[in-house]
Amino acid sequence: MAAYMPHGRAVSDVIFEMYHSEDTHQLSLIRLLKHLKSKGIQKDDPRIMGLIKNFRDEGRSVSLDTPDPQLNQIDDVLVSKDSFGRCVSENAVINKVFKNQLIIPDWTSFTNQISKIYHDLLDETSGETAKYIPQLARVNPDKFAISVCTIDGQRQTWGDAESLFCLQSVSKAFTYAIAIDELGDQFVHKYIGTERAIVCASLIKTTEALSERFDFVMKRIREFAGNGFLSFNNSVFLSERETADRNYALSYYMREHNCFPEGSKHRENLDLYFQLCSMETNVDSLAVMGATLANGGVCPMTDKRVVCNTAVRDTLSLMLSCGSYDFSAQFAFRVGLPAKSGVSGNFIIVIPNVASIAIYSPRLDSYGNSVRGVKFCEKLVEIFNFHHYDSLIYNESNKIDPRLKNIDVEMLNISNLLYAIRSGDIDFVRKYTLAGIFLEDSDYDNRTCLHVAASTGQTEILEYILRHWKCSPEPRDIFDQTPLQNAQKFNHISCVKVLEEALTKFNSRRTSIANDLPPEISTIKKSVSNGHATSPELQKMNGPM
């Protein structure tokens, strides 16, 4: 639960009061890290490394009898209130977490849904590994890992998260973004249309030696990953180069038609392309790379701009239109999100302004996409309203929007319902009722469905609501007005009649129920209502005092 921040009070003071020990009057580092983890901020997050260091510098170290199972720590650090204030001063992550300003506020509910999809797909064993590259063909086909990273750096992994894989074609998305950032979109699109291309690698640092070009691109891609894990698999590079007859043939054909920049070195360009495809990473780092795109080119782990907004826009556009090989059109239709796949079995999906999810599962379908990767994305948009067109104004979907706080969801439902009543849209009211929306809820002025229907003269809707109403038909709003008084004020005679009949029925039913009570309950009821809460009957039911 997020801390409420009283006006004028420091965030650090509120946090300390919530989480300090009453016995020692100190705050535990482990307790703080556990809370951050519950919100998706992991212990290895570079943004809280300074916080942990400050704790160790300011506090008192305490050895644990057994390592903490959640954080795998063998010691704890305790700090005083003043020290804690110095430790967390100006830490943006701490402020966001405790003010409940993270993009996905209910991290536990969101990750529970992702976990369910992961476990549902464990039994999916269709497809086979890429056969044309020997190193990829020998990979364990049952490997399966998922990682999520939001634009606020909330992260979590499932499965074989430590398994390494080569980026393969996924590298093209980032190479393209770097080329746009370095050279501008007009220059790049002189050579590249609106599909992924081998040519892209040939545009970067054309006058430099091959080793310098590779180092440059690898450094830039590592920035996408927030300096996370990224390496190079030489055996995959050699294997790919030896089996690249088709790519060589295509490139010679393109060179004949002047598709490469003037003076470019043909063999070196292909070697660079194979090297970039052979860069190696894990799902955690790949998810951060995707989150940088989701965040408009700013890495959420470092808050550093990696590429310009134009590069991100164009990259996401291509990922949506051609990121899944010949399956791209179907993927865009079904999932509606930018994505990129690679024949090593890695798959990255970007939810703009929200998060990125990386999947690794080597079994491929006939198009060369990870079977589990595609199925995961399809299940994702069945649960969450992430599809590009789930945001339509008159969308009738009951999908989850994890960006909303619980109170936001409730208030949005109430607002939509009251607006529909005011507009006379009884079909919308019926739909909300069937969806299980609690009709007795009220808005910030304590006005209910009955108030709005009575005030606007919506007699048919008023009758419908009363048939499903479970409480007294005379709730009072913040102005101490009942629906009946509203109907009388605006001279809606038919609504007045309906409400008077409902009130008569309700009072009659309440009287009937009271008369049917057993004598001992009736006596207790009278005693309590008269203020005699210590009647013998009540004492007998409550037991000895």
Image (cartoon, rainbow, N blue to C red):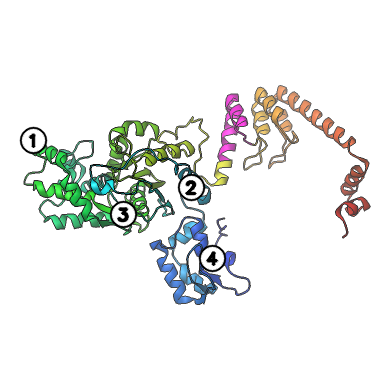
Residue 469 coordinates in the image, percent (x, y): 71, 32
Residue assigned mark 2: 115
Q: Are marks 1 and 3 in contact (CB under 8 Å)?
A: no
Q: Is residue 151 above or below residue 482?
A: below
Q: Magenta region: which residues?
A: 411-437
Q: Nearer the viewer, mark 1 or mark 3?
A: 3
Q: In the rendered structure, which amino acid carries the disc numbered 3?
A: Thr
> Toward the viewer: 345 or 419?
345
Q: Mark 1 or mark 4: which comes first in sequence?
A: 4
User: Image point 28% across, 38% down: which residue?
Assistant: 318
Distance from Cα at disc 2 to Cα at disc 4: 24 Å
Q: Main secondary structure of the magenta part?
A: helix
Sequence-first disc among 3 and 2? 2
- Identify the residue under disc 1: 257
Quickly name the residue at label 4. Answer: 31
Query: Which residue is labeled 3 in the image?
Result: 281
Q: Nearer the viewer, residue 137 or 509?
A: 137
Indicate which label's residue lies in the foreground, 2 or 1.
2
Residue at the spot x=32%, y=31% of the render? Answer: 329
**Side of 79 relative to 478 (left or right):** left
Which residue shows up at 35% across the image and 33% down it? 332
Identify residue type, mark 2.
Ser
Task: Give the image quarter of residue 386.
Answer: top left
> Which comes sooner in the sequence, label 2 or label 1?
2
| Mark 4, secondary structure of its residue | helix
Amino acid tagged 4:
Arg
